[in-house]
Image (cartoon, rainbow, N blue to C red):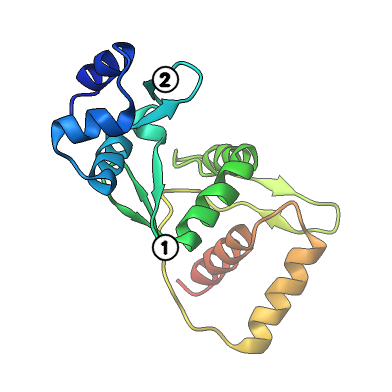
Amino acid sequence: MIDIEYINQKLREGLTVSEVRKELGIGEKRFLREVKELLYKFNQKTKQYEKIQSDKDMILVTKNNNVYNKDMTLVTKELQSNMIQLSKDYERINKMLEWFENNCDNDMTDVTVRISEGLSIDYIRSNEIRKTVRVDEKAYESLIELSKEYQQYTIKDLLSQAIYEFVNKYK
């Protein structure tokens, strides 16, 4: 690997980049590649090599348009666009996560809510579990319609209440 400080010293002494390269016995392509790998760029005004970016920010685009970070990890165009989209939606995603965390209260609480039309959610909440079940299509459509009528409740609340009432009725 080349020594940038040595090269800059020779440039201050009046040598050209080509002369320094020849003195080091390095070809032009190898020299340029090593300078780039060290994250330096030649400044025409000062006639010196200067650091261009922090290691973390450096992205290298190869001839076949693959993108690599400094550790030479492949970053595809799709991944790059996904990361850009995520950064654009950062605030919205944080708000959604905050809402989710606030609405996923895993404490044991007794919930009783009465609506003027008579719907009440009064099952005792406990830890939530995730299950996949198959349901009749028309029954599910009816549940979706009911959830549109009572938008203050989640489908989870409505389904949990229905199971609670069914189990209590047929114990």
Q: Between tags 2 and 1, which lies in front?
A: 2
Give the percent coordinates (x, y) of residue 69: 35, 45
Q: Quadrant of the N terminus?
A: top left
Quadrant hosting residue 136: bottom right
Q: Residue at x 51, y 66 (%)?
A: 168
Q: Give the answer, above or below, for where 152 lies relative to 101.
A: below
Name the residue carrying label 1: 130
Query: Of the numbered discs in the image, which one, if any, rests on residue 47?
Result: 2
Whether residue 145 sits left or right of residue 135 in the image: it is right
Classify mark 2: residues with Cα within 10 Å, few (<14), some (14-19) or many (20+).
Answer: some
Q: Residue at x 49, y 48 (%)?
A: 125
Secondary structure state at the residue bearing disc 1: loop
Visible residue check, residue 52:
no
Q: Residue at x 46, y 78 (%)?
A: 133
Residue type at the position of mark 2: Lys
Give the percent coordinates (x, y) of residue 60: 39, 47
Classify mark 1: residues with Cα within 10 Å, few (<14), some (14-19) or many (20+).
Answer: few
Q: Earlier in the sequence, mark 2 or mark 1?
A: 2
Q: Give the answer, above or below, for where 107 lies relative to 62.
A: above
